[in-house]
Image: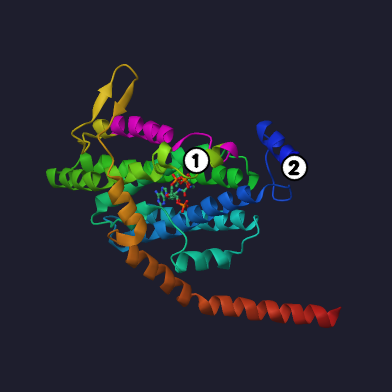
Amino acid sequence: MEPDPKEAEFFRRLDADESIEPKDWFPERYRKQLIRMMSQHAHSEIVGMLPEGNWITRAPTFRRKIGLLAKVQDEAGHGLYLYSAAETLGISRDEMYQQLLQGQAKYSHIFNYPTLSWADIGMIGWLVDGAAIINQTMLAKCSYGPYARAMVRICKEENFHKKQGMEIVGTLMAGTPEQRRMAQEAFDRWWWPTLMMFGVPDQASPNSAELTRFKIKRKSNDELRQRYIDMKVAQAHAFGLVVPDPDLKFDDATGHWRIGPIDWNEFYRVLQGAGPCNRERLEARRQAYADGAWVREAAAAFEKKRRQKEETAA
Ligand code: 3HC
């Protein structure tokens, strides 16, 4: 069967590393994969505000409170960026919201874990945002223009988030034995779940092959995970933290850190809703959506009035 000329042209442009823009023709599968990833990414940013927001009123100093406020506000902005970028694919923001609120859309599993102490805020900045940066730096080179451009801006702010987290962890590790214990206890809880942020193992991924062909993913899940492990193990040792993995060992032949097995059963349990905070996170988002109804109604009434004025003036 003759290849579809539009499809052939699309893949020629991909192979020439051209940026695909909203007005261009692209296959429905390309649109579906981008909507899946970009809407889940946006949901992750918005839900990710909840565990950190939990500590804004309890930050140990005014300076820490200001830094955390700024970070949480950034995450809201990242979510809005990504919803706007996803809208260029023809899905409405409200449709994406409904998918999340009805439990049909995913968000990063990592945000279903609780923030039990101030040290968790350091771990989220250092480890979670650190993982997001590695992933998002790759996505800044993805073939879809609006997503790649959104990543450039977001990565700059993520770097501030990561540095803020590292400074918190460094301060605790240079502090009292109680502060050091608090940081180690938080690290023990966040280490393994952050490794799962890079997606399932390559050979188990139903999406990676297609995402790679579409030049949305430029590196594999396991490649990015390994880069993260090599970076974070060295930083953990520099902090004086013990990596909670008895099988951890440095492989001189490859220059990489080798880890013990990741508990993918835990990952799928959390993904299917049995994580420590899944219910709480979704309830918080549903409540926020209900609380915001008056804003949507006021904006719709204003827009209706404006349209009526325009029509009578025409
Ligand atoms: N959390 C939730 N779901 C996950 C996941 C995770 N950590 N890892 C994988 N999954 C899901 C996938 O969505 C997929 O399910 P679906 O097909 O129903 O959507 C399934 O598990 C199989 O996983 P794959 O590895 O095949 O999925 P992907 O190829 O899409 O890779 C991903 C997963 C790396 C998360 C990729 O989707 C991605 O890069 N997404 C965009 C970036 C993103 O969403 N990052 C989330 C963190 S944002 C953040 O941390 C904000 C920061 O500011 C704090």
**Which residue reaches farthest top?**
253
Residue at the (68%, 37%) spot, across then down:
11
Res 158 quadrant in image = top left
Does 177 appear above or below 218?
Answer: below
Which of pointers 1 and 2 lies earlier in the amino acid sequence?
2
Q: Does the magenta stretch include residue 140?
A: no
Residue 314 is situated, as x and y percent measured from the top left of the image, at: 86, 78
**Which residue reaches farthest left?**
177
Residue 4 is situated, as x and y percent measured from the top left of the image, at: 75, 42
- Is 33 positioned to the left or the right of 250 in the image? right
Q: Can residue 106 be seen in this view?
A: yes
Q: For residue 241, which numbered disc appears in the image?
A: none
Label 1, ligand 1: CB separation under 8 Å: yes
Residue at the (69%, 50%) spot, across then down:
22
- Is 154 positioned to the left or the right of 221 in the image? right
User: Circle 1 is placed at which residue position?
Assistant: 208
Where disc 1 sits, the SS reads: helix
User: Circle 2 is placed at which residue position?
Assistant: 4
Does 227 appear above or below 86?
Answer: above
Q: Magenta span covers which residues?
A: 213-235
Residue 172 is situated, as x and y percent measured from the top left of the image, at: 23, 44
The amino acid type found where label 2 is placed reads: Asp
**Which residue reaches farthest front?**
1
- Is 44 positioned to the left or the right of 115 in the image? right
- Is 238 positioned to the left or the right of 206 in the image? left
Where disc 2 sits, the SS reads: loop
Of the 4 image quadrants, the one containing the N terminus is: top right
Foreground: disc 1 or disc 2:
2
**SS assignment for the magenta stretch, majority:** helix
Residue 107 is situated, as x and y percent measured from the top left of the image, at: 43, 56
